Each structure stands twice: as structure tokens, then as C-alpha cells.
Image (cartoon, grey):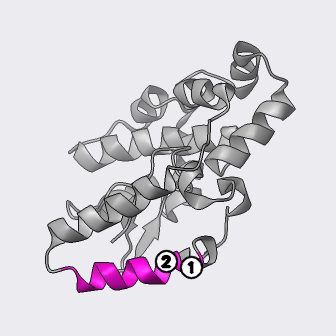
Amino acid sequence: MGVHFAPGGAVPFLGVPPGHLADAHIDLETLWPGQASELRDRLCDAQSPAKRFCILENALVARLGRLFRHHGAVREALEHIGRPGVAVAAVADRVGLSHRRLIEIFTAEVGVPPKLFGRLQRFQRAMAVVQKATSFDWAGLAFGCGYYDQSHLIRDFAEFSGFSPGELLRHRSDRVKVNHVALPDGTRSNLSNTA
């Protein structure tokens, strides 16, 4: 089983700021000492998927007993960063923080800096179009998703998926989950770095 949190949504469940976990693989036992192995055992013993989901939901709700409040600026920034034409500096002005302070609190709560988050959002918009479309105007796609030009789109596709847009199109599959890309050898690459 796995849980996909909305951007910034994992904070109350982790026990540490997501920014401290970026670019690392941490097992749940490290974050929830003693509780993670008990949860795993209960999930394995459950007789049905519905029971497993119930057990997992209850474990997550129990973690919400810890008081945590998002910084108001992060909530506001999440609504605006990643929209076409919205710069991080403009969002910092909007929320009344310095650019540096916004980066600091956003990274701590979301797990990635706001600029990277915006790039990931833009890439995911482009991926959604690529997954559904049958023919492409790559320059139009780039512009429509907030890229400066087609080469900008190609660079992000290569960085986040390992493929150019055309190569990714040849490897797409209806079985691919959101934020994952099927690779030629059958493995998957996670495209999301937001907890």
C-alpha cells in the first residue's frame, strides 16, 4: 500500500519537515519507530483491501492528533506557484515574505523549493496533455503549459522523465499512474518529489 499526499500534506504525518527528507529514501520505521512494523503486521493480517484501507486510514488519523499548522504563506503559495506566468518573487510579495524566507518555509513544509515545485507542476500539466492527446503541436503544448519555448519543455521532459517528449510519447501507456512513467525495461520512474 502507498499514500500519495497533496503537496505540503505529508507534514503532520512525518514527524519531520519534508524538506529534511528530500532526495533520500527513508523507511517508515525510521519516522515511526515501533509503530511502522506494527502497522505493517496489521495490514498483512487484514483479510480484505477494504480492511487494509481502514487500518491505514485509522493510523494516519491517529497521527493527526499532533498539532500542526501550515504557515499561511505556504498554503497561499501552493495555490499560486506553478500557474503559468507566476514567478516565485511575485508570490513572496503577495504573501508578505522575503523571497529567501518563502523558499525556506516552503521547502521545509513541501519538500522542494518553490521554483522546483512550479517546474514539476508545469511538467505534470504537460504530461497530462501528452497522455491524452493523439497528435501534437509541441510548440503549442509548450506555450499552453507555461514554458517559454519548445526547447524549455524538452529540457524539463528530459530532466524529470529521462525522455524527450517524442520518446516519452512512444513509451506512454494507459496503465501508467499519475506521476510515474513506464520505462522501456518495464521499470517505473517517479516524477514527483512532493510528499
Q: Position of residue 146 (x, y in %)?
A: 52, 29
Q: Position of residue 46 (x, y in %)?
A: 21, 79
Q: Give the range drawn in magenta.
A: 33-46
The three-letter code of the residue at mark 1 reads Glu
Relative to 14, 182 lies left or right = left
Q: Does the magenta portion include 35? A: yes
Q: What is the distance, in whole Å, between disc 1 and disc 2 at their CAs?
A: 5 Å
Q: Position of residue 84 (x, y in %)?
A: 53, 24
Q: Which element type, helix, strand or loop, lies under badge 1?
A: helix
Q: Would you say the magenta stretch is mainly helix, strand or loop?
A: helix
Q: Does the magenta portion include 12? A: no
The three-letter code of the residue at mark 2 reads Ala
Q: Quadrant of residue 169?
A: bottom left
Q: Earlier in the sequence, mark 1 or mark 2?
A: 1
Quadrant of the image containing the N terminus = bottom left
Quadrant of the image containing the C terminus = bottom right
Q: Name the residue under label 1.
A: 29
Do callouts 1 and 2 mark residues in contact (Cβ within 8 Å)?
yes
Q: In which quarter of the image is residue 129?
A: top left
Count up the numbered dots: 2
Relative to 65, 16 lies left or right = right
